[in-house]
Image: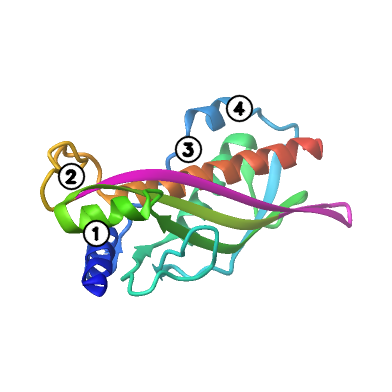
Amino acid sequence: MRSIIIFLVGSILLLSACASTIPMTTKMNDAIMMGIKTSQSKTIGYEYTSNVVDGTIKPCLKDTRDVQPGHPGYTHNESVTLDKMLRDYLSMKFNSVDNSSEPKIKVVLKDFWLEQYSPDSNAKKWLTALGGGELNVIIVANLDLVYEISKGGTSVTKAVRVSGDSTHVTGAGTGTSTSNVYRGKESIEFEVADAINTANNKALAMLNQFIESNQM
């Protein structure tokens, strides 16, 4: 019986049997856009490197890098998405972006991972598996980056870690008339996309702060 309940709870959290596509967005939030001040440097060089391969990513357990067993994963293009957002930001910050120019801004996306878990008690998970109900699922998107500004033969670097989170309510069995599934709310894939977009916007905010602190 215990193995059956674990299987049912796992099924509730996974929601699908195969990797599903995350509807990624390059939307820059209003706070970032309003906080961008035109730089005194007219032209800036830009170099982007990613250690993250776009494709399938499997979420980890809370506060760990341990992949959830049996999760089919999600299909993402975070490397391309973040690069596009960085270029959009730089085009607003500077008059022009020329890769051969100095000063040059280098961005390295070192790592990207997701956490996905339910904050509900084990008792609630068991009851949901047995009789139906709702479970909350928290998604956290994490980025490790390195920023570097080089000019006049010198350079300064900054290591940054940012994260964004979102919540999805999933219904199972009976008693789900109030769940997000029944209210026509976003799918868990949209919530994952929202968490990633929040993390990406925080990465832009940290880059903007880094640029301004170095008087560019």
Residue segment shown in magenta: 147-171
Q: Which mark is residue 28?
A: 3
Specify the quadrant that holds the N terminus: bottom left
Q: State which tag comes first along the sequence, 3 or 1.
A: 1
Foreground tag (4 vs 1): 1
Secondary structure beneath dot 4 equals: helix
Cα–Cα span, label 2 and label 4:
36 Å
Q: Position of residue 89 (x, y in %)?
A: 56, 40
Give the mark nearer the N terminus: 4 vs 1: 1
Label 2–label 4 contact, CB within 8 A:
no
| 184 relative to 105, above or below | above
Q: Do the residues under discs 1 and 2 have CB atoms within 8 angstroms?
A: no
Q: Which residue does the numbered mark 2 point to in the structure image?
A: 181
**Is residue 153 positioned above or below 87 on the image?**
below
Q: Is residue 153 magenta?
A: yes
**Helix, strand or loop under label 2:** loop
For disc 4, the marked residue is 35
Which amino acid does the dot numbered 1 rest on? Ile
Residue appearing at x 15%, y 43% in the figure? 176
Name the front one of labels 1 and 2: 1
Residue at the disc numbered 1: 12
Mark 2 or 4, nearer chain start: 4
Callout 2 touching callout 3 (CB < 8 Å): no
Find the distance from the CA under tag 4 to the CA under tag 3.
11 Å
Report whether 84 appears left or right of 154.
left
Residue 17: x and y in percent read 22, 70
Q: Is residue 90 visible?
A: no
Whichever of labels 2 and 3 marks the residue nearer the N terminus, that label is 3
**Which element type, helix, strand or loop, lies under badge 1?**
helix
Residue found at the far top of this picture: 34
What x and y, as percent, mark residue 139? Answer: 41, 51
Q: CA distance from mark 2 to mark 3?
A: 27 Å
